[in-house]
Amino acid sequence: MAIQRPKGTKDHLPGTPGTPEIQAAAHAHIQHVAAQLLERAGAQFIATPIFEEAELVQRGVGGSTDIVRKEMFTVYYAGDHGGYVLRPEGTAPVVRAYLENGLKQLGSPLKLWTHGPMFRAENVQKGRLRQFHQVDYECLGSTDPLADAEAIALMWDIVTTLGLKGVSIQLGSIGDPEDRAAYNDYLRGLFTPRLAELSEDSKDRLSRNPMRILDSKSETDQAIIAELNVKPMLDFLGAEARDHFGAVQGHLQAWGVPFEIDPSIVRGLDYYRRTAWELHHAGIGAKSALGGGGRYDGLAQELGAKEEVPGIGWAFGIERILLAMADEGVPFPQGPSPALYLAALDGDYIPLAAALTRQARAVAGADFSYRKRGAGQAFKEADKKGATWAAVIGSNEAAQRQLTLKHLGSGEQVAVPFDELNTFLKENA
RNA sequence: GUGGGAUUAGCUCAGCUGGUUAGAGCGCCUGAUUGUGGUUCAGGAGGUCGUGGGUUCAAAUCCCAUAUUCCACCCCA
């Protein structure tokens, strides 16, 4: 094997080899289901470049995050440009495009969705790739808790429509920036005297992001946390954030969307505030998050907008959805299979088979053999291609100007004149 | 970035303590099959044994490095 694909990437293949994670048709299915539900909800499709100015990611995602500190793919070209980055997530680019193109003119709030590859230079393990694919939804221009609840409900509708049963929504609020600052101060005050006892990771967390200490996997850390009787973030919410969080929960309950309050939820990107949530599934490895989202009312100004554009959005990982579906044994639709397969019994009739096939493609999937085939071979090929109907063309068919179509599922045979073929396929494909 | 396991045909894997032309099943191609598929039978293609180096008369097998992958940590989708 001379050249291999880069570490942490997957080829999306036709057919059904290996896991659904690499099946092109399975990826397309997820996108299709998401597209349908999101567009029914009024979300409009938007696509942004795969690469962006490095500064967009640094300011949007946040300089203290692991994404910016150690996971950026930087792109240089022959010139003195400082470098682009392959986008690691979708929200900052969508907000950038909204601001740059004045999409406010389309009305407010504006619901947008996108999908495509994202890039993070991480170490690889199951469900964790360097190029992965996300479906991304953003609702810009509203601070209403209805926007939050609707976003969460849409995500829930997509995973349940896909057939997943084992998904849970972990919902929390990280408050407004001043609430979070107060909580971080509280945590630092609590943990600093115990600094020497904390794990190495948590010593580092104490300065960068104290909330992360709370879900440390270290037993000694957890013992200290239990001993200190740490208050949850939710106790520090200001009145507005608390009311907002309560309203979000109320809407979800009214709509029958199940969720669990997770007071320790911490999202990895700096721009989040107030509502934050994750979708989890037990069957996809150590990282059980299928996706997550949150509110990011400060992001637009961080990117240089003069006026604030409140927003809320989420993303889920298509590969992780596929792993979850495989874990539950949820079936996937396969790639395209023709409604009709034709083969000529004699070389003289190959042009006729080709012409009829092309005619049939006006109404249905159709394919034919380039070579003359024996009748047995013809049906074997048709079967292998997953055709619904198959027929051979020889002197009889050519003389009578009709096909004997055989239904490969039932074995039933039907005589269909050439000029009624398309009508027949339209009704029976 | 850290620690551990794995890597032999397209896929799943066998290959004993080093020994001559590296195997199986599935899949693929051809034929039995100049007029009816899923079955069966026969034949065939496909391998730098992840890569590079070392030890040895001799390496898929032992040693070192490296790549990829899986598991865990960090952390995210």
Image: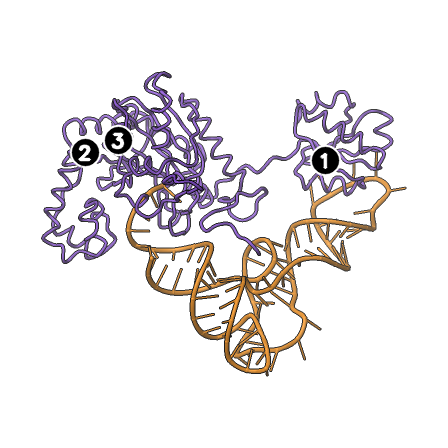
Q: Amino acid at mark 1?
A: Gly
Q: Residue flagged by tag 3: what amino acid is it?
A: Glu
Q: Are marks 1 and 3 on the same chain?
A: yes
Q: Is residue A48 above or below residue A26?
A: above
Instruction: Find residue A108 and report its horizontal and vertical position in percent.
Output: 32, 18
Mark whose residue sits in front, 2 or 1: 2
Q: Colour of chain B?
A: orange
Residue A237 got which mark?
none
Say left or right for B73 vs A202. right
Please state which of residues A369 and A184 is positioned toward the viewer in this rendering: A184
Please tell me the numbered disc located at residue A411.
1
Q: Which chain is purple?
A: A
Q: Give x and y (percent) for residue A198.
A: 17, 56
Residue drawn at x 67%, y 25% as measured from the top left: A428
Real-space CA distance between mark 2 and mark 1, rounded to the nearest whole angstrom: 68 Å
Crowding at label 1, few (<14), some or many (≥20) Cα neighbours within 10 Å? few
For the residues labelled 2 and 3, say whether their Cβ atoms are less than 8 Å apart. no
Q: What residue is pinned by disc 3?
A: A302
Could you say whether the residue bearing mark 1 is in a helix, strand or loop? loop
Relative vertical location of residue A56 with respect to residue A145 in this rendering, above or below = below
Q: Which mark is residue A177?
A: 2
Q: Looking at the image, which residue is at 18% across and 47% down?
A: A207
Among numbered discs 1 and 3, the one appearing first in the sequence: 3
Task: Specify the quadrant that holds the N terminus of chain A.
Answer: bottom right
| Chain identifier of the residue bearing label 2 in the image | A
Report the quarter where the C terminus of chain A lies: top right
Percent position (x, y) of residue A11?
Answer: 52, 45
Q: What colour scheme was applied to this rendering of the protein?
A: by chain
* Discs 2 and 1 carry the same chain letter: yes
A367 or A60, nearer to the observer: A60
CA–CA distance between discs 2 and 3? Answer: 13 Å
Comparing labels 1 and 3, the label whose residue is closer to the camera: 3
